[in-house]
Amino acid sequence: MIKDDYLSHALTPAELSAINQLICAVLGTDHVDDEALRRLVTQRDESIQRHLDNLSEAARDQFAKAELPINTKLHATVQSLFADSLSELSGLVRGLKAVKKYK
């Protein structure tokens, strides 16, 4: 189970925190909805870009430094999902080949 604060830090604005909670909810399901996750990650990126545009240079630097490990965690999570999907797809292809072979 992924905690609600998995993608947040002390400098996370409310709008971004809400998106992060939605992402955590999607990631916390048994079967991750790829399209919903992609849409939320895009919204997250847009929210971060808007937030950065409204910050002073010093605050922007602080926020970016706090956000970097969060982005690294999110990237690792998505990469793991991708690897799992590839493994599942590979098993399905092998199964399909086996069925065709014995037809």
Image (cartoon, helix red, strand yellow):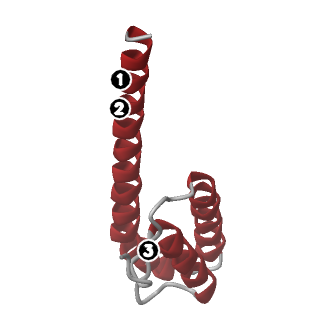
Task: Please say if 40 is above or below 7.
Answer: above
Q: Which residue is mark 1?
A: 94
Which residue is drawn at the image coordinates 63% and 71% (left, top)?
Answer: 47
> What kind of element bears circle 3?
helix
Horizontal side of residue 9 vs 17, given as left or right:
left
- Front-lying residue, 99 or 80: 99
- Front-lying residue, 91 or 44: 91
Which residue is drawn at the image coordinates 63% and 83% (left, top)?
Answer: 15
Q: Residues within 10 Å of mark 1 (few under 14, many from 20)?
A: few
Horizontal side of residue 26 vs 91, given as left or right:
right
Q: Position of residue 84 (x, y in %)?
A: 35, 46
Residue type at mark 3? Asp
> What kind of element bears circle 1?
helix
Kindly report the distance in space between the C-alpha atoms of the residues bearing marks 2 and 3. Answer: 45 Å
Which numbered disc flags the more N-terminal residue, 2 or 3? 3
Where's the N terminus, which quadrant? Answer: bottom left
Residue 28: which quarter of the image? bottom left
Task: Please say if 24 is above or below 87.
Answer: below
Task: Please say if 69 is above or below 63.
Answer: above
Q: Which residue is mark 3?
A: 61
Instruction: Identify the residue at the far front of this view.
Output: 103
Contact, CB < 8 Å: mark 2 with mark 1? yes
Q: Which residue is mark 2?
A: 91
Horizontal side of residue 100 vs 39, given as left or right:
left
Q: Position of residue 6 (x, y in %)?
A: 38, 78
Q: Residues within 10 Å of mark 2 (few under 14, many from 20)?
A: few
Contact, CB < 8 Å: mark 3 with mark 1? no
Contact, CB < 8 Å: mark 2 with mark 3? no
Horizontal side of residue 58 vs 44, given as left or right:
left
